[in-house]
Amino acid sequence: MFKEKIVEGLRAKSEIKRFGLSNEAIDRIATAREKTVTEESQVETVLTDAETMRLIAEELMKHRDQEITKRTEAQSAFDDYKAKHPEGNEDLDDKGQQQPDLAKTIADAVAAAVAPLTEKITTLENLNSTKAALDGAREKFFGGDYAKKYKDEADDAWDRAVEMNEATGNKMTADELAEKATGYFNKAVSRKGVDTSKPFVADNTGEEDEGTTDWSAEKARQQAAGRLPKEQ
């Protein structure tokens, strides 16, 4: 139902256009992905999700293998010709001039054809790795109770961490990115007097002003453990 929209999206996406997929490859990818789309709002997400990136990688590898097969067959045909014409003059043309080394020519052609495809596959793998790290870090960071409570500060901290990661070549792992965002976040909320090293305690519903945290339960635990003096 949404195949044509997926096809259009794949052709329009700049991060996908760089791979130079054929119309046939795009059609195969769209056919596979439309099975998971039930409404139009999902099309945009499908265009660059992990499964689509995997299918793109498969198409690129298929193209690369076809190029290798084609060049290998040409090499085999040349070797077969040489085996059937062992006269000793196979390196000379009809004018007695040295012919080009066909074996080297074919080998160079294989390398020239395969190199850009291999580079594209590597680029795609790097994109997948970056996206996986980003998704993992986002889930880890925003899953914290403090981040859920102080959403504005969390959003700002996340944006700063992502910008830093991009500026350094997207080399951070999921843990490193989440840690960077957490560092920015802790500094931001500390200006509000919030100490994120302390256990999070949910607000009392209806008992205090919205946005305040009830530390009474934590205080009682600390007093029971002897870390805080008990009230007289």
Image (cartoon, rainbow, N blue to C red):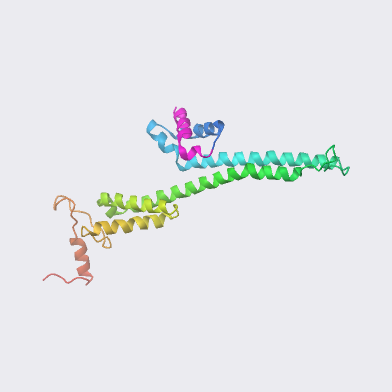
Q: How many marks?
A: 0
Q: Quadrant of the N terminus?
A: top left
State whether the magenta stretch is mostly helix, strand or loop: helix
Coordinates of residue 42 in the picture (x, y in percent): 40, 35
Determine whether, in the image, residue 64 is placed left or right of residue 83: left
Determine whether, in the image, residue 215 is placed left or right of residue 101: left
Instruction: Indicate whether residue 5 is drawn in magenta.
Output: yes
Coordinates of residue 14 in the picture (x, y in percent): 46, 38
Position of 231 relative to 160 (above/below)? below
Q: Quadrant of residue 93?
A: top right
Coordinates of residue 199 in the picture (x, y in percent): 26, 61
Residue at 52% from the left image edge and 33% from the top image edge: 26
Q: Quadrant of residue 218?
A: bottom left
Q: Quadrant of residue 227?
A: bottom left
Highlighted magenta segment, given as a residue range: 1-19
Determine whether, in the image, residue 69 is placed left or right of residue 56: right
Residue at 53% from the left image edge and 31% from the top image edge: 27
Position of 15 relative to 208 (above/below)? above
Work out whether residue 214 can be spotted. yes
Determine whether, in the image, residue 154 is placed left or right of residue 214: right
Kindly give the residue lying farthest to the left in the view shown: 232
Coordinates of residue 228 in the picture (x, y in percent): 19, 70
